[in-house]
Structures are given as C-alpha cells and as structure tokens.
Amino acid sequence: MIKDAYGVLHKALAQAAAIGMIHRNLTENCSLPKLKAPEPVHYEADDIKNFLAAIHDHCHENYYKVLLFTGMREAEGLGLTWDCISFAKGTIEINKQLRRNREILICFSKGQRIPPIEPKPSSAHPPAKKKTAAPDGVTVSFWWTIQDCSA
C-alpha cells in the first residue's frame, strides 16, 4: 500500500517537474521502508488430522491432499495438467496458474517450480501407506492420491 502511494506521488511530482510547476521532484531521494516477509504458516499435527477428517470422502479430497503434501498454492494446483506430473522422475512441474478474474478463467505462467515427491513404488511391491509431510499418526501416500485421481 505504501509502495502504491509512493508510486502515484512520484509519478505526479515527476510530471509537475517536467512541465515546470515545481523545481524538482522531492521523491527522488526518498527510500521506501523494507517490508518483512510474513512468517510461513506451519500446520500442527492436530490441524492436519482435523483437515484430513473434514475432507474425507469429499469430491475434491485428492486435490486437497496434493496441495497439502506438496505445498502448492490453490491457483498452481488448478493449473496442473497430467503432462506436469513425471512419475518416472517423481516430480510435479508447476509452470502455470489458473485463476478466476470476475467470470473469466485466466491461465498464466510465472517461472517454474518442481517440488520433489516421494519415489514411485515398484510394481512388484504395492505402495505402503507412508508419511509424507504429515506428523504423528497421519498416514497418506502421495502416490495413492495421484493414482486415485487418474482413475
């Protein structure tokens, strides 16, 4: 908000200086305050258990689990396509986002992120219920989630 106000004031004073209304733009020597990045929010074990219980049997349960255990943002998850998932490498390529702007869905790219996921189990051994990012007693296998999605 401060940055926006500074930008508007700076541009207005620059135009005033250019047409001779003022001698110089006094905002040239101003420095903006450094903003502290917000602390990341980490979920407690009880929060994760309650969340997983709340989404159990929900039609988007697998989607929510993918977001939870990979750290993806909602718009990044909505932008995923099957070609973004590499089962061989055990990665998900996050290269686009899908957002709703009023009544239009907009897909845009901003760089690329590839979070690792647990190794794919071999076909000889069925996937074990393995803890990924979940603490104490919450067992979810990421590959079970992905396989459920593709069915």
Image (cartoon, helix red, strand yellow):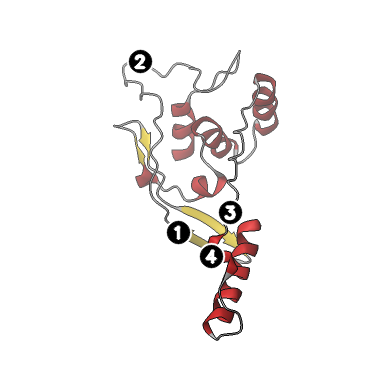
Mark 3 — residue? Answer: 32
SS assignment at label 1: strand
Q: CA distance from mark 3 to mark 2?
A: 58 Å
Mark 1 — residue? Answer: 108
State the image quarter where residue 94 is shown: top left
Label 1 or label 2, whichever comes before in sequence order: 1
Mark 2 — residue? Answer: 125
Q: Disc 3 residue type?
A: Leu
Q: Disc 4, disc 1: CB below 8 Å?
A: no
Which of discs 3 and 2 lies nearer the camera? The answer is 3
State the image quarter where residue 115 is shown: top left
SS assignment at label 3: loop
Q: Nearer the viewer, residue 16 or 96?
A: 16
- Taking the spot 32% from the left edge, 20% from the top edge, the residue there is 122
Label 2 or label 4, whichever comes before in sequence order: 4
Q: Disc 3, disc 1: CB below 8 Å?
A: no
Label 3 or label 1, whichever comes before in sequence order: 3
The correct choice, above or below, for 84 with respect to 19 in the image is: above
Q: Disc 1 residue type?
A: Phe
> Residue 9, how many percent across, how many down?
63, 69
- Taking the spot 60% from the left edge, 74% from the top edge, the residue there is 13
Mark 4 — residue? Answer: 28
Number of numbered labels in the structure image: 4
Label 3 or label 2, whichever comes before in sequence order: 3
SS assignment at label 4: helix
> Residue 76, how many percent across, how many down?
49, 47
State the image quarter where residue 93 is shown: top left
